Amino acid sequence: FAHLPGHHAGQPLFPAGVGSKKQLFAADVMAAPLISVHATDTRAIFTRVLQAHAHNGFPVIGDGGQLLGLLLRSEVRYFDERATAADIMDRSPCVICESWPIERAHRLFTTMGLRHMIVMSRDYARPVGMITRYDLIPTQGIER
């Protein structure tokens, strides 16, 4: 994130009070509604999702709506005719709760070098949104 205009290493993108009189939370800046894929989706289905949406990361969900993993746009090349989203997804994506302060999410992005973070409901039962590095640029996240 050091390349972002006005951002210096070690300083949060969202200092307290900047652009807002209230504390910002993950739910305030996440992309929603969530665009996801089902664990049983094949390459053909995933390709249609990619054509319809410009996102790069897609949560993979099970029959009950529970989060199973994360599938990236770049991983479509790993699909063969028999593979499903569940076969090639990242089974341990980074998740946060929708009630987390955005500064906490920012710390995870910077310390772990993340590109995508799945936002979960307060009870962690289902995914409700997605945060990317783009969402943490102050002029993007605050104006939502």
Image (cartoon, rainbow, N blue to C red):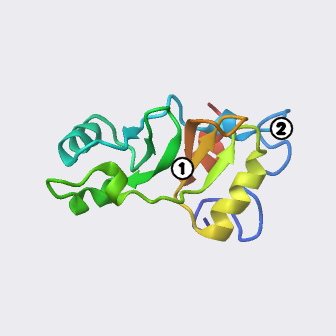
- Mark 1–mark 2 CB contact (< 8 Å): no
Q: Position of residue 128 (x, y in %)?
A: 58, 34
* Observer-nearest of 112 and 85: 85
Q: Position of residue 63 (x, y in %)?
A: 43, 33
Residue at point 39% right, 44% down? 55
Residue 52 at least partly seen: yes
Q: Position of residue 50 (x, y in %)?
A: 28, 42
* Observer-nearest of 70 and 22: 70
Quarter of the rendering containing residue 141? top right
Task: Tell me: residue 130, above or below residue 64.
Answer: below
Looking at the picture, which amino acid does disc 2 mark? Gln
Residue named by callout 2: 23
- Horizontal side, residue 140 vs residue 15: left or right: left
Specify the quadrant that holds the C terminus: top right
Q: CA distance from mark 1 to mark 2?
A: 19 Å
Secondary structure at badge 1 equals helix
Task: Tell me: residue 121, above or below residue 5.
Answer: above
Secondary structure at badge 2 equals loop
Looking at the picture, which amino acid does disc 1 mark? Tyr
- Horizontal side, residue 41 vs residue 33: left or right: left
Residue 2 at least partly seen: no
Task: Tell me: residue 59, above or below residue 9.
Answer: above
Residue at point 44% right, 60% down? 90
Residue named by callout 1: 134
Residue at point 42% right, 38% down? 36
* Observer-nearest of 70 and 133: 70
- Horizontal side, residue 143 vs residue 70: left or right: right
